[in-house]
Structures are given as structure tokens and as C-alpha cells.
Image: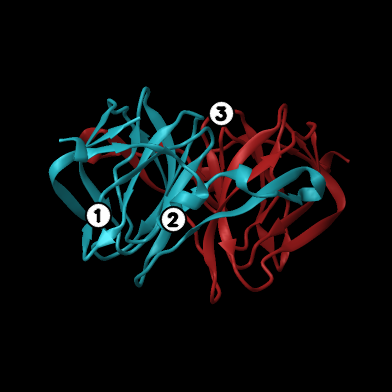
Chain colours: A cyan, B red
Amino acid sequence: MSDRHIQVKTLTPEAFAPFGSVIDRSCLEPRAMNAGMARRFHDLAKIEIAGQDARVVIGVVEAKAYPVPLNLPLVERHPLGAQAFVPLTDAPFLVVVCHDENGRPGRPQAFVTTAGQGVCYGMNVWHGVLTPFGAPQDFIVIDRNGPGVNLEEHVFDEPWIVTI
Amino acid sequence: MSDRHIQVKTLTPEAFAPFGSVIDRSCLEPRAMNAGMARRFHDLAKIEIAGQDARVVIGVVEAKAYPVPLNLPLVERHPLGAQAFVPLTDAPFLVVVCHDENGRPGRPQAFVTTAGQGVCYGMNVWHGVLTPFGAPQDFIVIDRNGPGVNLEEHVFDEPWIVTI
């Protein structure tokens, strides 16, 4: 059984790079704007989308808290677009991703965010559903809307257990 | 002088429709997702962009507070893309927009947001810079990155005064 256990790591841009972007202003130097009245941390994540008549849309997701250790029965991916989640509070949440292995997800990797971090899952990257823990959490979501099948799910033969 | 004074109105999707979208989950019915563990308020704003090699990017802007009544010396617009601002706190901020009149901004209209509201300025819509008041405020910004000149500023002959 122990080989179904995944230990979370701290989320860093370097560790997450194969899967997408960490949205984290502390990783960038800001640029001044509006005559010094504001500063911008630019280009924290690119929202790639594919397909005709597709657009980037903004939504809000209210997610319930999951118990930890996390039971992970499935992952999903979006073949036609990246998907970014930016938390509206400083609470941490779990981020689960997998490399693709011949069209199927490999062994999951799990990360826990630190305050202020969001993530952008790259187009077609296997990832777990939104999993706050401890308390419910609201997120801004930026992703693709348009025609075409943009969701693929993979249910594991046996669930993984993610331990914090 | 009194004709340079603009009185703010409460921001509503109807009043703002000619200028873009109000990003406000309370205006939509959510849809369930993740087996009932989350609900999504979908498509609160579309991020239109124009031009080759352009992408939608996510940034963070930290904006200082402006004194009110607000002195409004200029507005700007982005010919190649919409620009969305989603506040990370529930504090209100000022939203100033103008209809275009033969390539120049007409008389400004000013709105004050209510808790949880963001805005998406439509492509090429004249608008004021980000103006929190009372306290500094952080925003998620979703807009365009790419080649081309995507900023046009207009300095008024005489500033407008926006009164709350």
C-alpha cells in the first residue's frame, strides 16, 4: 500500500515548471505604472488556448475543503487550454500534477502552496481538482471557453493518498 | 467650475455594459463541479485581444490610495485588448470610463464598486487608471501582452473632479 502514498512538497516555480506557472508576485521585480501610484508584477502566467472561436474567460470558483490526507481517485486535463487559479485568500491549497506517459498520467506529484501563490496548469497537463484543505476557499479562475471537448478525466485503478 | 464635477454612481452590470463587464459572482447562478465539492460562476468576463503573437497574461498590481474627491487629469485606452481588474480584498475602488467621441473621450462617468466586484474594460474603451481610495489595494490583472502599441492616453484640457 505504501507505494500509493505521495508526500507533498513546497510549491516553487522551478519544481512546477514542467507543468505550468506558479502565479507568485514574490518571484518578480515589479515595474512602476500610473506615475508611481501603482506597481505591476507582469506576466505571471500565460493563458494558452487552442481552437477556433475560443476565448479566455474569467470566473470565480468556490471550493469546499477536502480532508487530509487527501484521497486522489482521479486527475483531469484540458487539451485545448491552460487553466489558472488564483486564491482570494492567503490560505494554502493542494496542487497535484502528473507527467503524461503515453496518454496516461504517471505517478502524481503533490505541492502545497504558500500564502499568495496561485497556479496555472499548462494546456493538456494532468492535474487534480481544486483542493483546499482546512477551510473552504474562493478562487479566480482564468481559462478557455469555446467549442470542442476540453476535458479528459483519468480514474486511477486505485486511489493515491496525498499526505501533508 | 461645477461642470467639471462628476458624481459617482453605484457600479451595476447594466450601467457598465457599454464599457465592458462587471466581474461579480452575485450576478450569476453557479454551476456545480468536482462532484459537488465546488461551484463555478462561469464566464464573468471575456478577455478580447487583437493582433498576431498576442497572449493573455496574468499579473498583480499593487495600487496606492488616491485622495477623494479624485482629481482626474487623464484617461487611457488599449486598442489591442481588454483589461480586467479583480480586487483581492472587499474594499471599494473607483471606476471611471468615457464614451469615445470622434477619437477623444467624452464626459467621464464614474462608478464605485461594491465588495467583491471587479471590472473588465472592453478593448479600446477610455478609462481612468486604477484608483483605490481610503487604503492601498491589490488586484489581479488579466490583459494582453504582445507586439504593437496598446496604450493611448488623453490628457484633459482641465482635470475632472470625481466626487463620492
Q: Tell me the element at label 1.
A: loop
Total labels: the figure holds: 3
Residue type at the position of mark 1 = Gly
Q: Quadrant of the C terminus of chain A?
A: top left
The tag on residue B90 is 3
Residue type at the position of mark 3 = Asp
Task: Reply above or below: A108 against B35.
Answer: below
Observer-nearest of A50 and B86: A50
Q: Tell me the element at label 3.
A: loop
Image coordinates for residue B80, horizontal then vertical, percent: 60, 68
The tag on residue A106 is 1
Seen as rendered, the residue at the extreme front is A2
The answer for how far apart the CA atoms under marks 2 and 1 are is 16 Å
Within 10 Å of disc 3 (Cα), the crowding (few <14, some 14-19, many 20+) is few
Observer-nearest of B116 and A91: A91
Residue at horizontal 56 percent and vertical 30 percent from the top: B114
